[in-house]
Image (cartoon, rainbow, N blue to C red):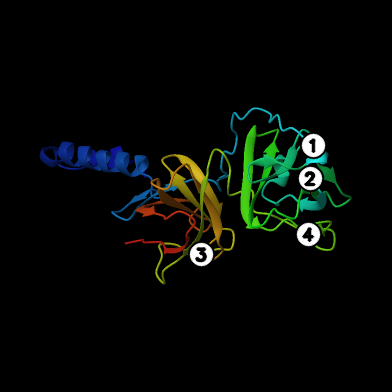
């Protein structure tokens, strides 16, 4: 149909006005995007599936850990530490690991070992004595590719002439305690009964501080949210495969330090 040829058949006193109105309507229809939505609870933008990830890169220098003097300690124990799956993609031969007891370096810094299944292990010979009771143990891992230090801490007695980690994997929580993001939370996101989309197994969710991704996962499964301090609040984004776009939720979420939290997304 030729729109202009048909409007020319109208009486002159309405033809110009109606033609102009129809033309404006046509232009509006062509310029509007039916896939973009706004509401008080969220905004929606058409987008391909996002590759959300936390930027773990830092500027920490290579540590200058000094091996302990074995003559100062009466005994030793061995630790076999398997690197967490979250950190494996960033691991290189430049990585280092050691253990401190009560603020003192007690192990010769270890480089990584890679087995036939591409699992990454560090072997630590730790020096100590029987009077190390209820000592503060701090494991440090330096990731060379990220220029970032990760650590975890616990309290225990020094175990004389004992080996840990050979019979079963010893995987300690390093990922959620970095110099860059010292505060971490386990967050589980759930959906209400009514949503503006049909949920799909390939849908994903992410936590943001401003425009910076601080954690990503899937509905119903806990994932880590990393923050620089406990006062930072997060905003959630949801990718819908069925709608082919990203929902940015208006709700802001405050998290306590070291808290496990479940949040139901609000769509209205």
Q: Secondary structure at mark 2?
A: loop
Judged left or right of residue 169, residue 48 is left
Asked if the residue at tag 3 contacts the one at tag 4, i.e. Cβ–Cβ closer than 8 Å, the answer is no
Query: Could you tell me residue 262's position as x and y percent?
Result: 46, 64
Is residue 247 visible from the viewing direction of this image? no
Q: Which mark is residue 169?
A: 4
| Earlier-in-chain disc, 1 versus 4 | 1
Q: Residue 12 placed where, x, y %?
A: 13, 37
**Closer to the camera, 96 or 106?**
106
Name which of mark 4 and mark 3 comes first in the sequence: 4
The answer to whether marks 2 and 3 mark residues whose Cβ atoms lie closer than 8 Å is no
Of residues 229 and 36, the one drawn nearer to the viewer in this rendering: 229
Residue at image mark 1: 69
Q: Quadrant of the N terminus?
A: top left
> Is the Cβ of the residue at disc 2 closer than 8 Å to that at disc 1?
yes
- Which one is nearer the viewer's eye here, 66 or 95? 66
Question: Farthest right residue?
Answer: 116
User: Can you tell which of label 4 and label 2 is closer to the viewer?
Assistant: 2
Say whether marks 4 and 2 touch (CB < 8 Å): no
Q: Of helix, strand and loop, which one carries label 1?
A: loop
Contact? badges 3 and 1 (CB < 8 Å): no
Q: Which residue is mark 3?
A: 199
In this view, 63 is above or below 168? above
> Farthest residue toward the bottom?
193
Q: CA distance from mark 2 to mark 1?
A: 8 Å
In what element is the residue under mark 4?
loop
Along the horizontal axis of the image, is 67 left or right of 210?
right
Residue at x-position 33% and y-position 44%: 29
CA distance for labels 3 and 1:
59 Å
Q: Which residue is mark 2?
A: 73
């Amino acid at each position: 149909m030729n729109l202009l040829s048909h409007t020319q058949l109208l009486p002159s006193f309405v033809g110009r006005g109606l033609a102009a109105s129809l033309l404006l309507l046509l232009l509006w229809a062509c310029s509007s995007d039916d896939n973009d939505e706004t509401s008080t609870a969220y905004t929606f933008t058409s987008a391909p599936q996002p590759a959300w990830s936390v930027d773990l890169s830092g500027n920490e220098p290579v540590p200058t850990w000094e091996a302990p003097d074995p003559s100062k300690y009466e005994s030793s124990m061995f630790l076999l530490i398997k690197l967490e799956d979250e950190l494996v993609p960033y691991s290189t031969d430049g990585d280092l690991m050691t253990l401190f007891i009560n603020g003192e370096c007690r192990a010769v810094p270890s480089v990584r070992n890679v087995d036939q299944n591409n699992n990454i292990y560090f072997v630590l010979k730790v020096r100590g004595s029987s009077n190390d009771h209820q000592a503060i143990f701090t494991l440090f891992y330096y990731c060379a590719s990220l220029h970032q230090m990760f650590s975890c801490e616990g309290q225990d007695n020094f175990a004389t002439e004992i080996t840990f980690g050979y019979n079963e994997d010893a995987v300690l929580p390093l990922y959620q305690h970095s110099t860059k993001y010292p505060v971490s939370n386990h967050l589980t996101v759930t959906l209400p009964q009514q949503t503006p989309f049909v949920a799909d197994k390939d849908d994903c969710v992410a936590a943001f501080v401003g425009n910076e991704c601080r954690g990503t996962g899937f509905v119903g499964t806990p994932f880590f949210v990393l923050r620089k301090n406990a006062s930072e609040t997060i905003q959630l984004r949801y990718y819908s495969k069925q709608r082919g776009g990203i929902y940015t939720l208006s709700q802001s979420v405050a998290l306590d330090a070291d808290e496990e939290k479940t949040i139901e997304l609000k769509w209205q």
